[in-house]
Amino acid sequence: MFRDAAEIMGSDPLRCHRSQVVAFRWRGFTPELWERMNDSGELRPLSLEPLDLFVSEARLCTGERDGAPCLETLTPGLGRCRACDSFPVQECRFQPRCRGTLCEGTVCGEEHTVYLALFGPRAKVGMTRSSRLRERGIEQGADLIVELERQRSRYEAREAEQRISRERGLPQATSLQSLAESAVDGSLEEAVRIWEGMSPSFPAAGRPQVLDGYPLRGLATAPRVMPTAGKHRGELLGAKGRLAVYRDELGMLKALDLKDLVARFVGTSPSACAQSTLF
């Protein structure tokens, strides 16, 4: 038996929030958020201009069961529960267990690319389907991304990523605050300079792709990454990777994690939830 949203959230989401964020993606250098309206179930684009958003603590599955929204609670990093996820084995998103032979998933058996991404002076290695290299760089907010090697499957790519990480002393992840710091003016030029110094040690690397089209310019200092739940209000300055940067009413630069919005409920009126467990 599934619990209803009011029971899980400690208050009525139809009263406290207007919608649930169900998707975040980039189309080229244009970020898109999608919301599902609580009253009608309609899917529509969610605009952050003007930025005046009240975000729930609770995160519920964005999938559907029998024509109705699924209400399973989620752990951070996932937008759907196991039953609703399109990935046959959720764990394989992060740590593949085969070369596409143990389940019906098609992604694991596709060619993958191991890449180096630079965020200003900070470098990391990662892997993605070869057809998504540039898209993956934009999703992550990288200033520069370059192919290091290709592998026949997701499993082999993860092994190669871990090998390169170990041999080169490079991390496989970057923090949100590091991403925020890479939004400062000059980070792109610094990333290019760092790659020029690193490239001789990667003779088989592909041609680097400079990612210079993010709708965010003119930051003299790095914004502070804020907790997702709660109130976000101010002047939207732009977005890079998973972060939207805004200037609050006191003039402070802040950043909102757009990817972490997915599965949460949003509205504009915290006063409507005065009895909510959020406060």
Image (cartoon, rainbow, N blue to C red):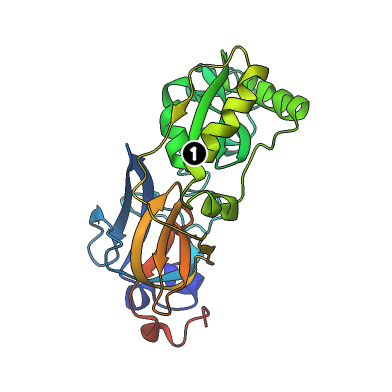
Closest to the observer, 148 or 259: 148
Q: Is residue 175 left or right of residue 25?
A: right
Residue at image position (52%, 54%) is 180
Residue 186 in the image: x percent, y percent? 48, 46
| Closer to us: 97 or 66 | 97
Name the residue beneath numbered marker 1.
Answer: 189
Residue 138 in the image: state x and y as whole percent: 43, 38
Whole-percent x and y of residue 183?
A: 47, 51
Whether residue 3 can be seen here = no
Q: How many marks?
A: 1
| Crowding near the residue tagged with mark 1, few <14, some 14–19, many ≥20 C-alpha atoms within 10 Å | some
Tag 1 secondary structure: helix
* Residue 252 location (% of width, % of height): 46, 72
Viewer-closest of 254 and 187: 187
Looking at the image, which residue is at 25% across and 53% down?
43
Left or right: residue 34 compared with residue 127: left
Q: Is residue 275 above or below residue 131?
A: below
Q: Amino acid at mark 1?
A: Glu
Q: Give the quarter of the image for residue 68.
A: bottom left
